[in-house]
Amino acid sequence: VEAGVREMAATMESAALLRAVRQIDAEGGLSDMEREEVRAALKGGRYALTNLLAYPPRRSEDRAAVQSHVVELRHGHSVRLGALDVDNALMLSDALDLNEIVCVELLVAAVERGSPPDDCTKAAAGIYLKERQSAVEALLRLLQVRSSPDHWAPAD
């Protein structure tokens, strides 16, 4: 998989969302700037929070595109795939019941993060699972804040 393609937007979105939600726990409350950062992250992460299980499903058209060795990613970049890349993307797709092009994006992100291109499937699956975990943890923290608003109210 060629490097140089940005990481999956969803992965970055969930990680940013979790970082922002964790700021809520900061000692002494949030500054105005931090509060705005949290609001922006919540706004940007709304889809991830309300659709935790929404990932593009497998599609025969996307499977055929991966098998053609050239894939157009969601960010508008084209990626040339080798035979091992195709096998890895299809294996991830089948194992995770996930769209084939999303799996190519996960493989690209794994290589960008330093995984060897010939052994990046575990790292790609880990990225996917970490993204899911981040979204769920962010939602959990927000629900905890909502259920005990007095604990999170600004000190007078």
Image: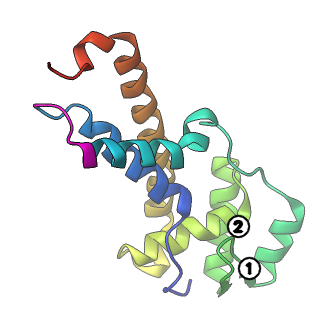
Task: Measure the alpha-carbon separation of dots 1 and 2.
Answer: 8 Å
Q: Is the residue 154 above or below the residue 35 in the image? A: above
Region in magenta: 28-33
Q: Which residue is mark 1?
A: 72
Q: Residue at x 33, y 13 (%)?
A: 149
Q: How many marks?
A: 2
Amino acid carrying label 2: it is: Ile
Q: Residue at x 49, y 62 (%)?
A: 124
Expressed as whole percent of the image width and height from the top left, the position of residue 20 reads 33, 44
Amino acid carrying label 1: it is: Glu
Expressed as whole percent of the image width and height from the top left, the position of residue 25 reads 21, 31
Q: Is the residue 56 above or below the residue 78 in the image? A: above
Q: Nearer the viewer, residue 33 or 19?
A: 33
Q: What secondary structure is the magenta-colored segment mainly?
A: loop
Viewer-side label of 1, 2:
1
Q: SS class of the residue under badge 2?
A: helix
Residue 139 is left or right of residue 8, and the answer is left
Q: Residue at x 64, y 36 (%)?
A: 51
Q: Which residue is mark 2?
A: 101
Mark 2 surroundings: few (<14), some (14-19) or many (≥20) residues within 10 A: many
Q: Earlier in the sequence, mark 1 or mark 2?
A: 1
Q: Nearer the viewer, residue 155 or 7?
A: 155
Q: SS class of the residue under badge 1?
A: strand
Q: Nearer the viewer, residue 115 or 36?
A: 36
Q: Is the residue 115 above or below the residue 121 in the image? A: below
Q: Residue at x 81, y 83 (%)?
A: 68
Q: Residue furthest left?
A: 28
Expressed as whole percent of the image width and height from the top left, the position of residue 117 reads 47, 80
Q: Are marks 1 and 2 in contact (CB under 8 Å)?
A: yes
Q: Residue 78 occupies which quadrant of the picture?
A: bottom right
Residue 115 sits inside the magenta stretch: no
Mark 1 surroundings: few (<14), some (14-19) or many (≥20) residues within 10 A: some
